Image (cartoon, rainbow, N blue to C red):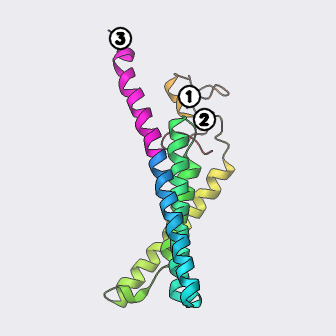
Amino acid sequence: MRIEDAVEPSERGMKLLEVGTAYFLLALFAIGFLDLLLVLVDLLLSGEFTDPNQVIDIIDTVLVLLIIVEIHQTVVAFSRNEPVVRIVISAALIAITRKVISFRPGEYATIDDAFVAAVAFSLLLGVLVAAFFVVRRVDTDAVTPDSFVSGGGGNEGDGGAGPGNRTDAGRGGDG
């Protein structure tokens, strides 16, 4: 028995689970969107729409929905064997931006804890922005997960992971 024949059923099962995850994320987004609409209607009717804390909470919810969209795109691209690095970095940027926007120093035990968290958020945001621009500048469209599996010899132009080609960490390049 060939190893490829033995592994094939598990690969099909994994693809089904990936598609199931994509639909779960779609349902989660729909629920979150409906919840956002209900919160907006409630705030408009109560007149609390101008309360800064409520506005930050709305922005926080919108950013969570955008993170769900990015994760969905990652799962779909992953299941199609398309590059995912740019999508993952975008999701991380949205997530850290969400943390920065909703940052409340009063929620920390001491001012020193709040300062450490603020510095950590700043550093992480800076690293992610740099990574985003690096990935945008590097042409990785030719590198996909299949080019690693297909045994490309690493020669220029064949999509392999040799010294002549640029690669990303993880499953592939950016989309």
x, y percentage for residue 70? Answer: 55, 54
Q: Is residue 29 left or right of residue 6?
A: right
Q: Quadrant of residue 110?
A: bottom left
Image quadrant where one finds the C terminus: top right
Task: Give amino acid for label 2.
Answer: Val
Instruction: Please rate how many residues cluster around mark 3, counting C-alpha atoms within 10 Å: few if below 14, some from 14 to 19, many from 20.
Output: few
- Badge 3 vs badge 1, beta-carbon distance below 8 Å: no
84 relative to 130, above or below: above
Query: Is residue 125 visible to the viewer in this orientation of the structure?
Result: no
Residue interval drawn in magenta = 2-22
Q: Secondary structure at mark 1?
A: helix
What residue is pinned by disc 2?
A: 143
The span from disc 3 to disc 1 (Cα, nearest Å) is 22 Å
Foreground pick, 109 / 26: 26
Asked if residue 166 is among those painted magenta in the image, a careful observer would answer no
x, y percentage for residue 18? Answer: 44, 39
Task: Give amino acid for label 3.
Answer: Arg
> Which residue is depicted at the point 52% across and 29% down?
148
- Badge 1 vs badge 2, beta-carbon distance below 8 Å: yes
What residue is pinned by disc 3?
A: 2
> Which residue is depicted at the point 50% across and 44% down?
75
> Which residue is depicted at the point 63% across and 33% down?
164
Foreground pick, 3 / 131: 3
